[in-house]
Amino acid sequence: MAIVLFDSVNRNSLFPLTKTRSVAYLRTGIYTMAERWQHLTGMTVYIHTAAYLQDLYGCPDTVEHIWIDAAVLPTPDLMDKMQGLSNGSCWADEKGLIIGKHHFPFAAFEALQSLQHFTHIHDHPLAERFEYPWQLVQWNDRMLRLDFETVIKGRKSATISSTNKLIGTDQIFVEEGARIEHCILNASTGPIYIGKQAEVMEGTAIRGPFAMGANSVIKMNSRIYGATSLGPNCMAGGEIKNSIMIGYSNKAHDGYMGDSVIGEWCNWGAGTSNSNLKNTAGMIKVWNEAANNYLEAGYKCGVMMGDYSRTAINSSINTGTVIGISSNVFGEGLLPNIIPDFSWGCKGVKYKMDKALNDIDNWKKLKNAALTDTEKIFLHHLNEK
């Protein structure tokens, strides 16, 4: 038996981030949702997502599994309920299935979401779920603290060089192979986690809560404020505050990134900055494709940037901007707050598909990777919609 994390019918509300990945592969805190469930339970985790993305994750055998809404935050109460499930039973709230155990084939999963095949349905108070992309940063502080406790349980940090200034050493954990010299790590405001083979260059100051994944790099004299998460193989520089880079992306130069979520294989040109606060200090509304409307996202919100997108040097990103997937963003002055998928610039010109794929592959080669056939197929699918 294993866990299957499924994308509910609400996955589209997390666009553009879930256009190219399952909800289970969204990162907040130290982990993706899939990694978090695997670490908390020790169980194998499978993914059920939109049909055009399923080949990224494969399919488990049709045996009894525990099915969990991938957007639901794990809690001790939910973990206890998972242990008490019998086959054919589930917990659900007004938004649908939260967690259930069933011998159920992938192909018929829509029937499982409708609950019609469960023999025992238990009512559950409204569960906390990620429903919109800006919630990833709004809840990142909480998830970083939760994940840090999981990471350090029964473990000891690698030795940290004496050239560094450390504040709150019991809340700093460094994996083997990480390199940090002549930096300031202040964990008095929250824990700091440095992944394997990561490097923090000289002169950098970090205030927790903060996490950086394996093989990521922070350039010299950077200023990082919590709550910030860098996934694996990222490059960061300049000033970053309360933001998430899911993985394999770069903001290597000066400029400001705040209250933002950046997908994979993205690049910010030198001097690119985003606004995260309106000049009126008023409520920020962000375009939501699923709702076909602007939705309130709070008083601090930067940019939600889809995978494979890039900005030119000195780009000025507006408050509450949504940048779609595979876009090459450039333009004078403050950029528009909606930049569609496959944009060339920001004036309605379409990125030619053969060039878009070639450029993505070029960027991936810089990190010793290559665009896969599976990626090409789903990118063509999204371009043709």
Image (cartoon, rainbow, N blue to C red):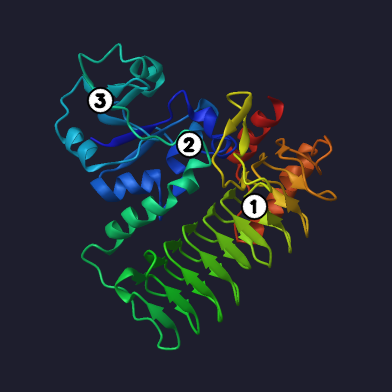
* Residue 218 position (above or below residue 24): below
Label count reads 3
Q: Residues within 10 Å of mark 2 (few under 14, many from 20)?
A: many
Q: Nearer the viewer, residue 239 or 355?
A: 239
> CB atoms at circles 3 and 1 under 8 Å apart?
no
Q: Residue at x 58, y 50 (%)?
A: 260
Q: Quick one: SS at disc 2?
A: loop
In-image side of 86 versus 137 (left or right): left
Disc 3 marks which amino acid? Answer: His
In-image side of 327 versus 150 (left or right): right
Q: Residue at x 37, y 74 (%)?
A: 176
Position in image of residue 376 (x %, y %)? 64, 38
Q: Quick one: SS at disc 1?
A: loop
Quadrant for the N terminus, please. top left
Disc 2 marks which amino acid? Answer: Ser
Q: Nearer the viewer, residue 284 or 51?
A: 284
Disc 1 marks which amino acid? Answer: Cys
Q: Given this view, does label 3 or label 2 mark the residue nearer the observer?
A: 3
Q: Given this view, does label 3 or label 1 mark the residue nearer the observer?
A: 3
Quadrant for the C terminus, please. top right
Q: Residue at x 53, y 34 (%)?
A: 14
Q: Which of the marked residues, 3 or 1, is nearer the chain's N terminus?
A: 3
Instruction: Point out which mark residue 266 bears.
Output: 1
Residue at mark 3 to residue at mark 1: CA–CA distance? 39 Å
* Residue 361 position (above or below residue 349): below
Q: Which residue is mark 2?
A: 22
Name of the residue lying farthest toward the front: 280
Instruction: Point out which mark residue 344 bears.
Output: none
Q: Which residue is mark 3?
A: 124
